[in-house]
Image (cartoon, rainbow, N blue to C red):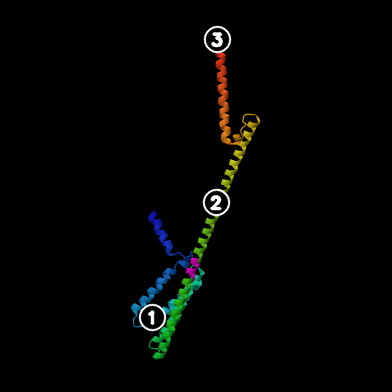
Amino acid sequence: MQDGKGEGKEISELFEGYRANKSALIYPFIFFLRRYLMILILTVMPWSKYAQILGQIYGTIAVIYYLSAFKPFTDGFMNLQERVNEITVLLAAYPLFVFTDWVPDDDRKMEAGWYLVSCILLNILFNIAVLVYFLCKDLIRKLKRKWIINNKKIELERKLQKEKEEQEALKKRQEVIAGLFHMKTGENMIGQGVFRDTDDQIPGVVEAKLKANEDKKSDTNSNQLIEMKSKPATD
């Protein structure tokens, strides 16, 4: 099952960027068929330059018609690029007749050669411009994504810092409230006469004196109990 899924994924990658219809998916077949027919003409009729040139021209015209009618690629700019490339091939194919026996003038052949070089150079520059365009577009997209991620990261750090500060402030408020509670408890004890020292307002001192007071009461009760038990024995 995994091998089948892997093969299906590889096949789908071959048709990535094509429209999901039969007319678009036959473009790779047309691509190879055109070149196969050209190789066949060169092999079967190597002496006929006219058949070779006409085969190139008619094949290019058919591909231009197919690209204009069906637009096999999902990206409209890709369809435009393919049409421009095929039109350049067509424009470069017509001057090839000048290099046959039909035109014996060498000056005309030189002019046709410069025209052919110009067509090829313009096509190269066009494809380089397209490549630079897509590279810049991809770079801008990546920088924009990175900028968004950094902004989200900064916002998250700020949020965490704010939550931390709020927790620290809450903790401080709780400590202050606890301290006020202990101070209030100490003041109540002082008012009742349990504590008389000024340091009784300190929470630790209050607890220590409360414990000492309880121990003192326990000792007093123990002594009274002993005295009560000892009185009958003396009588």
Label 1 vs label 3: CA separation?
A: 146 Å
Residue 137 lies in the magenta stretch: yes
Which residue ends up furthest to the right in the rendered image?
A: 191
Tell me whether circle 1 and circle 2 mark residues in contact (CB < 8 Å). no
Q: First in sequence, mark 3 or 2: give its number.
A: 2
Q: Amino acid at mark 2?
A: Gln
Q: Amino acid at mark 3?
A: Thr
Dot 1 lies on which element?
helix
Q: Nearer the viewer, residue 108 or 55?
A: 108
Give the answer, above or below, for where 69 lies relative to 100. Answer: above
Label 3 vs label 2: CA separation?
A: 77 Å
Q: Which mark is residue 52?
A: 1
Q: Depth-wise, is mark 1 or mark 3 nearer the camera?
A: 3
Residue for badge 2: 161
User: What segment is highlighted magenta in the picture?
Assistant: 133-139
Give the answer, above or below, for where 211 lies relative to 28. Answer: above
Residue 72 at least partly seen: no
Q: Is residue 141 left or right of residue 173?
A: left
The residue lying at 47 percent from left, 78 percent from top is: 87
- Residue 164 rendering spot, x and y as whole percentages: 55, 48
- Residue 137 rendering spot, x and y as whole percentages: 50, 68
Give the answer, above or below, for where 51 lies relative to 151. Answer: below
Q: Which mark is residue 234?
A: 3
Q: First in sequence, mark 1 or 3: give its number.
A: 1
Q: Amino acid at mark 1?
A: Gln
The residue lying at 35 percent from left, 78 percent from top is: 42
The residue lying at 36 percent from left, 76 percent from top is: 39
Residue 164 at least partly seen: yes
Dot 3 lies on which element?
helix
